[in-house]
Structures are given as structure tokens and as C-alpha cells.
């Protein structure tokens, strides 16, 4: 008898938990899905000793298969020695954008050569 009663109670609880519907007192909130962003590692494939420092996205992709997402959200370039942001060095850049990557040509500088830069990209994180 007690066993039967416990089975009945269990069944009642089971049904209750499976029949629950959102109600004004207890609204249903879906899990928030905020896309998280991640950085790639730093890439430094070239030195400025030739015509300049060439960190083109297409070359970086070729040399680091699968390491850079298809649609980067942001590119960041800094010097390899002092980690100075590229925009704070006063140097002139031939290319610095998301679609092509980063290039500093020596001939575009007012004096001296390009500094050595490294770049990284911001991507949506992979789950
Ligand atoms: C990236 O930079 C290159 C060189 O300045 C330019 O030709 C190209 O249009 C730029 N792309 C974007 C999306 O700004
Ligand atoms: Ca470099």
C-alpha cells in the first residue's frame, strides 16, 4: 500500500514537471546567447629588412591553416619589441585593415625603416 502510494506520488510529480508551462508568474526566459569574441595568437611572419614588414592576411592564412577565422572583426598591429600600437608609432602604413592585413613599406617612411610589427585578429569564439 505504501509502495503503491509512493508510485502514485512519483507519477504525479513526474507529470507535473513535464506539464509545466510558462505563466505570467513564472515567465520563460531563454538562455541569453551573447556572441563571445576571442583573439587569435600574434602573427609575425616578416621582418622589415627587405622592402618592408609584410603581414598580409592571405599569407598568414596560407601559413597558419585554420588559425584565422573567415570573418575577422578587428585587426590589431603592435611592434614586436616594445608592444607599441602601430597607430602610435608615427609610421605610415601601406595597408592596415581587416580585408588585407598589415603592410609597412620602408619607402613610405619619412626616415629610417619600418619597425617590426606583429598582428592578431578578433573573431567570434568557436564553441
Ligand atoms: C584595405 O587597404 C587597402 C590598401 O590601402 C585598400 O586598397 C582596401 O580597399 C582596404 N580595404 C578596406 C575594406 O578598407
Ligand atoms: Ca613583422
Image (tube, grey):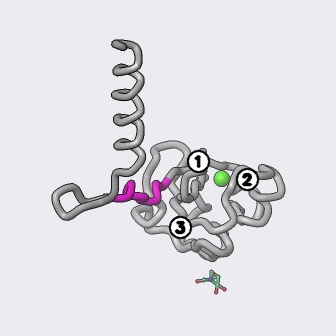
Q: Position of residue 73 (x, y in %)?
A: 53, 67
**Where, quadrant-wise, is the N terminus in this rendering?**
top left
Is any part of residue 55 visible from this angle? yes
Q: Residues within 10 Å of mark 3 (few under 14, many from 20)?
A: some
The residue lying furthest to the right in this view is 62
Figure quadrant, ligand 1: bottom right
Name the residue carrying label 2.
46
How far apart in space, not on screen, are marks 1 and 2 (Cα)? 31 Å
Write the residue at 83% across / 57% down. Answer: 62
Looking at the image, residue 43 sits to the left or right of residue 86; the answer is right
- SS label for mark 2: loop
Q: Residues within 10 Å of mark 1 (few under 14, many from 20)?
A: few
Is any part of residue 103 visible from this angle? no
Picture quadrant where residue 97 is located: bottom right
Tag 1 or tag 3, which sits nearer the N-term?
A: 3
Magenta extent? 29-37
Amino acid at each position: 500500500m505504501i509502495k503503491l502510494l509512493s508510485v502514485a506520488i512519483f507519477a504525479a510529480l513526474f507529470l507535473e514537471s513535464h506539464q509545466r508551462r510558462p505563466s505570467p508568474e513564472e515567465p520563460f526566459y531563454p538562455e541569453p546567447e551573447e556572441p563571445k569574441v576571442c583573439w587569435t595568437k600574434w602573427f609575425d611572419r616578416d621582418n622589415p629588412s627587405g622592402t618592408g614588414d609584410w603581414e598580409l592576411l592571405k599569407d598568414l592564412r596560407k601559413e597558419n591553416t585554420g588559425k584565422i577565422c573567415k570573418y575577422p572583426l578587428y585587426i590589431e598591429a603592435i611592434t614586436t619589441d616594445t608592444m607599441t600600437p602601430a597607430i602610435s608609432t608615427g609610421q605610415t602604413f601601406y595597408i592596415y585593415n581587416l580585408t588585407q592585413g598589415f603592410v609597412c613599406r620602408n619607402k613610405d617612411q619619412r626616415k629610417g625603416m619600418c619597425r617590426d610589427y606583429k598582428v592578431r585578429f578578433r573573431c567570434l569564439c568557436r564553441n
